[in-house]
Image (spheres, rainbow, N blue to C red):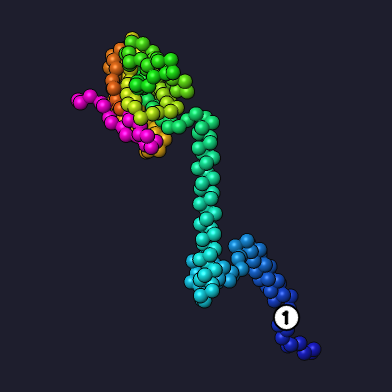
Amino acid sequence: MKARNREINIFNMSLLDILCGALGAFCFMMLVLFPYYKPKAQMSDVPGVDPKTYEEALKQIRDLKTLLQSCRSDQDSCKSDLKQSNDQLGMKNPMAVIATFTGPNDLDVYVEDDRVTVKGVRCPKADPNVKQGPTFTGDVHYDATAGVASDSWLVRDAPALEFRVYLKLMKQTADRQPTQARVNILLSLDQPVEVPTVELKRQGEMIRVATITPKPDGHASVRIDLPKK
């Protein structure tokens, strides 16, 4: 009988297959993680790292001063561009009043003020029975004639005078449903002001909801004028 070959061969095809599979998995993981690899920077070039020598500290201080000066120059440039854009648009202190109301009636927002045109024309007093638009060039009134909608009034340049905000129920449907409205006042330099919900019940009803008082520095104060319940 022929004797069996009992020699043990470690490096057979099965082992090579396992090694090749492991190498392939390792290469795949390296390819996936390669975009996240960043070489370690020198300590002196990393912001926020304590310098090891006096010279490195001076260098960081000089770099920070240069960066600060650059930021200030960019800020001044942005302010200049903004001022130039506002001058071109003619908008020095804009503000907007937006009244969102339920249907199906026609509600108007009206902003009354004490400005006078170059021809001596004054802003008309609020009239609950007449649709009223802007008197001054540049002001805009978007009139939504039926709810659910938003009626808006934009003042292009608000001087340091009183601006009185009114809501008027111009037209009511046959079922005489009341109209609920919520007013938001958007200012150029201050946070928006939200007026509590107002309800108008009859055609021709008018309610003064707020008084806006702009200041010479561009800021403004808002007083809520809703009638006490």
Q: Is residue 168 rendered to the left or right of residue 8?
A: left
Q: Residue at x 54, y 40 (%)?
A: 81
Image height check: is 75 above or below 215?
Answer: below
* Residue holding disc 1: 11
Q: Is residue 140 left or right of residue 215?
A: right
Give the residues in magenta: 212-229
Which of the 4 quarters of the picture holds residue 6? bottom right
Question: Within 10 Å of the Cα at label 1, are there few (<14), some (14-19), or many (20+) other Cα atoms?
Answer: few
Q: Is residue 222 found inside the magenta-colored segment of the image?
A: yes
**99 or 70, nearer to the observer:** 70
For residue 122, what is the image quadrant? Answer: top left
Residue 14 in the image, given as x and y percentages of width and height: 71, 74
Q: Amino acid at mark 1?
A: Phe
Q: Is residue 40 above or below residue 127?
A: below
- Can see residue 72? yes
Between 170 and 27, the one lying in front of the other is: 170
